Image (spheres, helix red, strand yellow):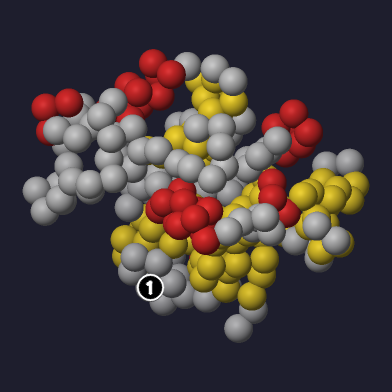
Amino acid sequence: METKKYVRIIRNVSKYGDMTGQIFPSLGTWEDSYKIDGPDGVVYVRKRDVEVIVTENRRPKVDERVLITEVLLSSGDYKIGDIYTVRSVVDIYGTITVKEHSNCVISREYDVIVNSEVKNEETDGMENVNQTVIDNAKTVFEKKDDKYFGYKSRFGDIVIGGAYSYSFVVHYAKTNQDVVIIPGDENTVTTPVCTTLEERLWKPDEAEIPSPRYLHC
């Protein structure tokens, strides 16, 4: 079974510019960097600035996650680099529906994710715990100075590397589930999700139990 490794640039927008947020097939490593084929030739991207996504080219199972690697039939619902959760497998060819939108995705447009993590060789045990929180979040903002920068979004409604105000982040957290902030210190994360149903603008599933790690907005 074919396995591929992709890297998504998630940090340091000032250094990587328009490449931030995009995925690139890994061409190998060199010291503390991944080698990728950028728009103007080979680029070396620091390991601490990327998310590593390992995939397999196969038919997925329900609830597995897939990475969009090519767009052939989309009407604009998805783009290369998006990550979705499989709702159903439609046919023997591997066409799927996903939980995040109503369009079908054909087998040539995705790979099945078997591992996804942010590589940072400076991480310790606590950072690994925090990374699990980040990986499970639907949207992440990273605070730098007085701005909050888009770090990732499974909904595609946040510009990766885009700057947002605190008031926007709070409203977004009230409107959407599983929002995480990296408050300038990579060793800590916060989850500014409202603790009471009355404060939430989004409606949780009846079976959902509020997590004790959620903080007041």
Task: State the image quarter where residue 116 is shown.
Answer: bottom right
- Across and down, in percent, residue 55 comes to 58, 68
Which residue shows up at 43% across the image and 19% down it? 166
Q: Amino acid at mark 1?
A: Lys
* Side of 123 where 13 appears, left or right: right
Relative to 119, is 100 above or below?
above
Quarter of the N terminus within the rendering: bottom right
Under tag 1, what secondary structure?
A: loop
Reply above or below: 163 against 10. above
Q: Which residue is mark 1?
A: 61
Please report the residue visible at 33 percent of the width from the left and 42 percent of the height from the top: 178
| Rendered residue at 64%/75% (across/down) | 3
Residue 105 in the figure: left or right of residue 111: left
- Whole-percent x, y for residue 64 in the image: 40, 67
In this picture, residue 64 sits left or right of residue 148: left
Residue at the spot 45% in from the left edge and 57% down from the top edge:
129
Dot 1, crowdedness within 10 Å: few (<14), some or many (≥20)?
A: some
100 in relation to 163, above or below: below
- Does any portion of residue 53 appear in the rendered image? yes
Residue 80: image location, x then y, percent: 59, 48
Between 27 and 217, the residue placed more toward the observer is 217
Q: Position of residue 138 (x, y in %)?
A: 40, 44
